Image (cartoon, rainbow, N blue to C red):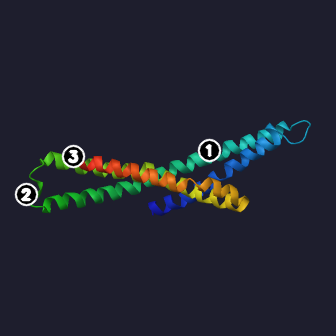
Amino acid sequence: LFVFAAFVLFFVISGANLIMPYINRIAVDNYIQPKTQGPVSIKGFALVMLSMLILELILRGMSMVRHHLLIAASNRMIIDLRNKLFDKIQRLSIGKISTRTAGDLMRRVTSDTSTVENFLVNYLPGVLEQLTVFAAVSVFILWYDPLLFLLIMLPTPFVVLSFNLFWRYMRSLFRKRW
């Protein structure tokens, strides 16, 4: 239930994040640098700024609720994961774990499951949200101007390759340490 509610909020927040640039466009085009000469409506400008504030407050509130839902769901998953890891360690032969002390093993299990929890609560939702926004904006840009889309997406394979090479190197350093 917690995961489902967080998943729904994820899509609602991603969609609401796409509204803010539209409101910014209205503010800039109609009030900050209007295309027509003449007096600018202070009332209209205040309404646009108020809508930006309200949308930002709603986004922050929904993000807080989603964060709490993810914490509740991840706590349950982490407890289950720790129990499974402890059971697995208890079933291992002494020869496999004799090079490490019991404290080292407990610290490692606790640290690793805390890292997984941190990833699930703090990083994964943001990455998924940004990927969703990226996909939506990409579709819009492709529809609006295919050449612009091509120019934006052209360097993508190089960036992905660079990240893969970097993380491959980082993983090799990590393996050497453990």
Q: Earlier in the sequence, mark 1 or mark 2?
A: 1
Q: Residue at coordinates 30% horizontally, 52% vertically from top-left?
A: 113
Q: Amino acid at mark 2?
A: Gly
Question: x and y percent of residue 142 in the render?
Answer: 68, 61
Mark 2 vs mark 3: give the one in front.
2
The answer to whether mark 2 and mark 3 are in CB contact below 8 A is no
The secondary structure type at the circle numbered 1 is helix
Question: x and y percent of residue 79 in the render?
Answer: 29, 56
Mark 3 surroundings within 10 Å by alpha-carbon count, few (fewer than 14), some (14 through 19), many (20 or more): few
Mark 3 vs mark 1: give the one in front.
3
Whole-number angstrom distance, CA of label 2 to CA of label 3: 19 Å
Whole-number angstrom distance, CA of label 1 to CA of label 2: 57 Å
Name which quarter of the figure residue 145 lies in: bottom right
Q: Amino acid at mark 3?
A: Arg
Question: x and y percent of residue 130 in the render?
Answer: 54, 53
Whole-number angstrom distance, CA of label 3 to CA of label 1: 40 Å
Residue 168 versus residue 35 in the image, above or below: below
The answer to whether mark 3 and mark 1 are in CB contact below 8 A is no
The secondary structure type at the circle numbered 2 is helix
Mark 1 vs mark 2: give the one in front.
2
Q: Nearer the viewer, residue 127 or 76?
A: 127
Q: Nearer the viewer, residue 49 or 28?
A: 28
Q: Earlier in the sequence, mark 2 or mark 3?
A: 2
Q: Is residue 71 in view from this perspective?
A: no
Q: Which mark is residue 95?
A: 2
Name which quarter of the figure residue 132 lies in: bottom right
Mark 1 surroundings within 10 Å by alpha-carbon count, few (fewer than 14), some (14 through 19), many (20 or more): few
Residue of label 3: 107
Q: Nearer the viewer, residue 3 or 116?
A: 116
Residue of label 1: 57
Q: Residue at coordinates 46% horizontally, 54% vertically from top-left?
A: 161
Q: Nearer the viewer, residue 128 or 15?
A: 128
